């Protein structure tokens, strides 16, 4: 062998590798899927190496793997990045996922990205020349209203590819619902749990990742593991907020509570940032549970009649607002607090009185308060109406250069004066969210990165690059860079972080970086999973660590 010319030894090596991969793939397929026939479509369009194509084509799957028409898997909500995968797996069993991950582990460079709804901004669920797993084909929602012997509290087991809207519909049938949400519910369970999942309930119950009892995960080694805070806790906490780096969430067990029938929904406008900020912080620090709202968010609005982010966007139909109602001293931007209190029809009068008492100490402009009652379902699904309206005008499927930030409380006033008051102009196209969150509701063991302050703010600048008006995508992304430069000195953290170099990731994770790498080596040592996050390169984790 030593005397063989290099090309011969390479050929021998590659044919050995081919044989080995083929045998292991057969083994992986058999182990997991019995003797079902291979389900590969359009093998002729496979643009991977012939070794990889034949290895993948020998997998025995219940679902199918397609090499054709991967356009959808190369697209996301951001419409900024397009990383075309080589193929898309539509799994119909957990074993399909196990087989794929094991097979990818045997290759030199194949990566795998679980895709929930693809509502990321920067290609996080994409996999250039890898395989995207379309998680929606592996559904399942099981509601346990009384829990069971091991877990005697109400819970739901939801597949990672299920949408939160469907989890809500299923749990409401039992009069129950999860406690912590995102604003928009057409997002997958696995996708939001890989980040955090936050909304106006987070101050009270923590993010969605603080409301998970157990996970069923396929690690980057292709192992199917059930984990919880007491069973394999390192994997459990690594996966929660772990940006898809440690395992694919097959099922999540989520805590449920009794759902109210109705909600009182309130919006109250402020012109003064300090009053707005103080009131929000008072609302989330209330310790008397009978006086706590069930949801607290805030928004920055443009001092204009723009129906999407000006003062016209605040009243609930059929109420209206006009220029004469806006105080003369209002600046270029104003603010409003959004609140919700749930109740049952039988308690409506008591709730009315309670809510009035809770609102009394707030310093909003008295003539600019708006109130409505809707069902709990309508409230939680409120963004869907916006989606339908924007879709009908062709304004939903446009580029979204969104910027989401966690800003320490001590920096939020500077952020207001340097960003909201100076950089936000009338042609800003999209909503701006700003609300405080209690840090103690986040589990420190989970992977999500947040500022090191007792209270921090979510600021979400949710711009759309409209086809016919307003600043273009490039100019909006330049604005984001300016804001990120301001943030650098304010100790902000990006939510849905986007970075290009290991150095930037190290700065993002701070003192937690080495542990993140340690966990990666433990659960996905070949860096197969979620390459679109751009944190690790395939097979190069060691190079990243010191
Ligand atoms: P994808 O984009 O498909 O995936 C995101 C990441 O998770 C990728 O890295 C992917 O590989 C990984 N992943 C996906 N599924 C799994 C799985 N099963 N196991 C392991 N990894 C997986 N977020 C909030 O917190 N609060 C909000 O209020 C909120 N509102 C939003 C409103 C809109 C209109 C949109 C578009 C997004 C909003 N988001 C919000 C952001 C959203 O939570 C994230 O973009 C989330 O990642 C989207 O879920 P997805 O199912 O589309 O994930």
Image: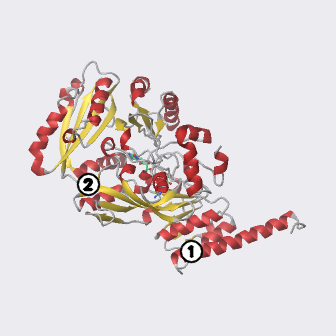
Q: Earlier in the sequence, mark 2 or mark 1?
A: 1
Measured Cα–Cα span from mark 2 to mark 1: 40 Å
Classed neighbour count for the residue bearing mark 1: other residues with Cα under 10 Å, few (<14), some (14–19), many (≥20): many
Mark yes or no: residue 541 visible: yes
Name above or below for residue 55 compared with residue 395. below
Residue 160 visible in the current orientation: no
**For residue 384, side relative to residue 7 (left or right):** left
Using the image, determine if residue 239 lies above or below residue 36: above
Q: Is mark 1 within 8 Å of ligand 1?
A: no
Residue 145 image point, x, y percent? 26, 63
Q: Quadrant of the N terminus?
A: bottom right
Q: Which mark is residue 29?
A: 1
Q: Which residue is denoted by mark 2 in the rendering?
A: 257
- In what element is the residue under mark 2? strand
Question: Closer to the camera, 397 or 518?
Answer: 518
Quadrant in the picture for residue 265: top left
Q: Name the residue rendered at 69%, 72% in the picture.
A: 20
Image-quadrant location for residue 14: bottom right
Q: Is residue 444 left or right of residue 326?
A: right
Residue shown at 37% from the left, 61% from the top: 158
Residue extending farthest to the top is 329
Nearer the observer, disc 2 or disc 1? Answer: 2
Residue 541 marker? none
Q: Nearer the viewer, residue 43 or 531?
A: 531
Judged from the image, the secondary structure of the residue bearing numbered disc 1 is helix
Relative image position of residue 485 (x, y in whole percent): 52, 29
Q: In the rendered view, would you say 72 is above or below 302?
A: below
Q: Residue furthest bottom?
A: 35
The image shows residue 524 at horizontal and vertical percentages of: 57, 57
**Horizontal and vertical percent for residue 157?**
35, 62
């Amino acid at each position: 062998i030593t005397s063989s010319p290099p090309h011969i030894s390479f050929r021998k090596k590659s044919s050995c590798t081919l044989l080995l991969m083929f045998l292991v793939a057969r083994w992986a397929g058999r182990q997991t899927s019995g003797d079902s026939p291979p389900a590969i479509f359009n093998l002729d369009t496979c643009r991977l190496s012939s070794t990889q194509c034949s290895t993948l084509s020998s997998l025995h799957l219940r679902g199918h793997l397609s090499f054709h028409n991967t356009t959808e898997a190369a697209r996301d909500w951001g419409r900024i990045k397009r990383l075309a995968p080589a193929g898309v797996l539509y799994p119909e069993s957990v074993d399909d996922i196990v087989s794929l991950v094991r097979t990818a582990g045997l290759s030199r460079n194949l990566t795998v990205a679980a895709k929930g709804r693809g509502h990321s901004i920067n290609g996080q669920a994409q996999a250039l020349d890898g395989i995207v797993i379309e998680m929606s084909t592996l559904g399942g929602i099981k509601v346990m209203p009384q829990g069971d012997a091991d877990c005697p509290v109400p819970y739901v087991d939801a597949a990672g590819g299920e949408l939160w809207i469907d989890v809500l519909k299923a749990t409401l049938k039992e009069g129950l619902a999860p406690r912590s949400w995102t604003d928009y519910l057409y997002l997958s369970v696995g996708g939001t749990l890989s980040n955090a999942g936050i909304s106006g309930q987070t101050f009270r119950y923590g993010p969605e990742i603080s409301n998970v009892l157990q996970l069923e995960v396929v690690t980057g080694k292709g192992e199917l593991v059930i984990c919880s805070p007491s069973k394999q806790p390192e994997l459990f906490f690594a996966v929660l907020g772990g940006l898809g780096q440690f395992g694919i969430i097959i099922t999540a067990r989520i805590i449920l509570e009794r759902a109210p029938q109705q909600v009182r929904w309130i919006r109250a406008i402020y012109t003064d940032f300090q009053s707005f900020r103080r009131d929000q912080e008072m609302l989330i620090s209330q310790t008397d549970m009978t006086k706590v709202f069930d949801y607290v968010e805030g928004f920055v609005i443009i001092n204009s009649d723009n129906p999407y982010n000006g003062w016209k966007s605040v009243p609930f139909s059929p109420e209206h607002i006009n220029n004469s109602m806006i105080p003369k001293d209002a600046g270029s931007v104003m603010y409003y607090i959004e609140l919700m209190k749930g109740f049952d029809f039988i308690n409506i009068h008591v709730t009315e009185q309670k809510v009035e008492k809770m609102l009394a100490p707030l310093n909003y402009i008295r003539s600019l308060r708006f109130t409505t009652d809707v069902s709990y379902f309508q409230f939680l699904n409120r963004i869907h109406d916006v989606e339908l309206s924007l879709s009908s005008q062709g304004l939903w499927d446009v580029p979204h250069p969104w910027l989401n930030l966690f800003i320490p409380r001590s920096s939020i006033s500077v952020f207001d004066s340097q960003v909201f008051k100076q950089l936000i102009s009338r042609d800003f196209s999209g909503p701006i969210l700003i609300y405080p969150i209690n840090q103690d509701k986040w589990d420190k063991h989970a992977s999500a990165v947040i500022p090191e302050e007792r209270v921090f703010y979510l600021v979400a600048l949710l711009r759309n690059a409209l086809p016919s008006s307003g600043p273009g995508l490039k100019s909006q992304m330049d604005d984001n860079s300016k804001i990120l430069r301001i943030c650098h000195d304010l100790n902000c953290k990006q939510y849905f972080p986007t970075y290009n170099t290991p150095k930037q990731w190290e700065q993002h994770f701070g003192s937690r970086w080495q542990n993140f790498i340690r966990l990666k080596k433990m659960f996905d040592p070949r860096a197969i999973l979620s390459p679109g996050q751009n944190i690790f390169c395939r097979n190069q984790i060691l190079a990243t660590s010191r």
